[in-house]
Amino acid sequence: MCPLCDDTGWKTIEVDGVARVTRCDCVRESSAARLIAEARIPRRYQHCDFINYTAYNEQLTKALHHATRLAESFPVVDRGLFLQGPPGVGKTHLAVAVLRQVIRTRGARGLFYDTRDLLRVIRSTYDPVNRTQEMDILRPVIEADLLVLDDLGAEKTSEWVEETLNLIVNSRYSDRRTTVFTSNYDDNPDSTDPDSLLFRIGFRMRSRLHEMCEFLYLDGGDYRELPPNGGVDDLVTLWKTRSKASRKPTLPARSTSQARAQLRDRERDPKGGELKWSGGRAGSK
Ligand SMILES: Nc1ncnc2c1ncn2[C@@H]1O[C@H](COP(=O)(O)OP(=O)(O)OP(=O)(O)O)[C@@H](O)[C@H]1O
Ligand SMILES: [Mg+2]
Ligand SMILES: [Zn+2]
């Protein structure tokens, strides 16, 4: 039983000496709890917040600042975030912190998906004749007020993967919906490096992402290597050790010729996929 409203959902408050009836806090809390539960945040990341994020260098401080600002100004935001960097620097942590805060404070419909999981689910419903089931998965992803797409680029790319991701990203872009991406891949525009973001996701997607997101590079140590009672000093040491070794994470390699061939295909067929989304948000431009 709610002590404020006796479970009626309404409580009486006093404004300038006048009694007013308003929605009880318990209603707001239970709908926030429901929205958090529906957001598909993995159990391992359910603790993630801004206050338990340690920013021990300039880049992490900047990332924390941008993430906090996005959550505070939501839904009045121009661009989402693209969080890049090596493993264990807290990209997913910050993305989830934004997601949880906008759900709690704005009642936003938020959704978290690991990109590979999402593609796997969509693929499992794929039927070239009847696309109803596929659209049932895609609709909430496209229409979520805030979407976190974790680990972009991790999926081995193919025409189908590109088509599907382009559909999601372009639909959200057209409807001005905010998306937060995380990725391990370097955003190196001129590179012939098969491990660059460009090669993983293609020209069209990369340029779209630059329009819709603020790109932030997070550099730091791998938090997963922090000893149980380790502190900021240990994190700084891990970071320094990593910077010295190499700035680049070890990633599954693809041959340069394979990547070049793919790039040529994209140049030849810049329009690509044929899937279209027609269910835009009413009244939005
Ligand atoms: N700066 C930090 N402050 C507090 N916790 C952190 C920080 N960085 C990472 N963590 C914690 O360490 C774990 C790993 O972080 P996270 O998964 O966010 O890293 P990531 O950058 O997304 O790595 P990956 O590239 O492997 O996906 C999480 O439990 C997260 O809460
Ligand atoms: Mg991550
Ligand atoms: Zn109540």
Image (spheres, helix red, strand yellow):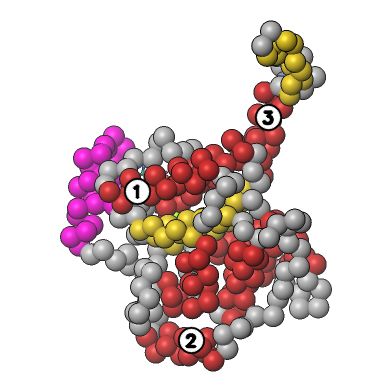
Residue 18 spot, x, y in % from top left: 73, 10
Q: In the visual, does 26 lie left or right of 241?
A: right
Q: Residue 60, position in %: x, y? A: 33, 48
Q: Residue at x 29, y 66 (%)?
A: 248
Splitting the image into 4 quarters, where does residue 233 fall?
Answer: top left
Ligand 3 sits in which quadrant?
A: top right
Is the magenta region chiefly helix, strand or loop? helix
On the image, numbered disc 1 is attached to which residue? 62
Q: Residue at the spot x=46%, y=38% of the render? A: 49
Q: Earlier in the sequence, mark 2 or mark 1?
A: 1
Q: Which mark is residue 28?
A: 3
**Mark 3: is the Cβ under 8 angstroms from ligand 3?**
no
**Residue 99, percent across and down?**
55, 45
**Which residue does the image show at 35% across and 83% down from the upper left?**
192
Q: Nearer the viewer, residue 182 or 118?
A: 182
| Marks 2/3: CA–CA distance | 50 Å
Q: Is residue 270 left or right of residue 196?
A: right
Height in image: 192 above or below 221?
below
Q: Is residue 168 something that shows in the picture?
A: no
Q: Determine contact: label 1, label 3, CB under 8 Å.
A: no
Q: Which mark is residue 262?
A: 2
Residue 156 disc label: none
Q: Given the image, on which type of amino acid does mark 2 rest?
A: Gln
Type of amino acid under label 3: Arg
Height in image: 4 above or below 166?
above
Q: Earlier in the sequence, mark 1 or mark 3?
A: 3
CB atoms at circles 2 and 3 under 8 Å apart?
Answer: no
Q: Above or below — where is 131 with respect to 21?
A: below
- The boundaries of the magenta stretch are 220-245
In space, the residues marked 2 and 1 are separated at their CA atoms by 35 Å
Badge 2 marks a residue whose secondary structure is: helix
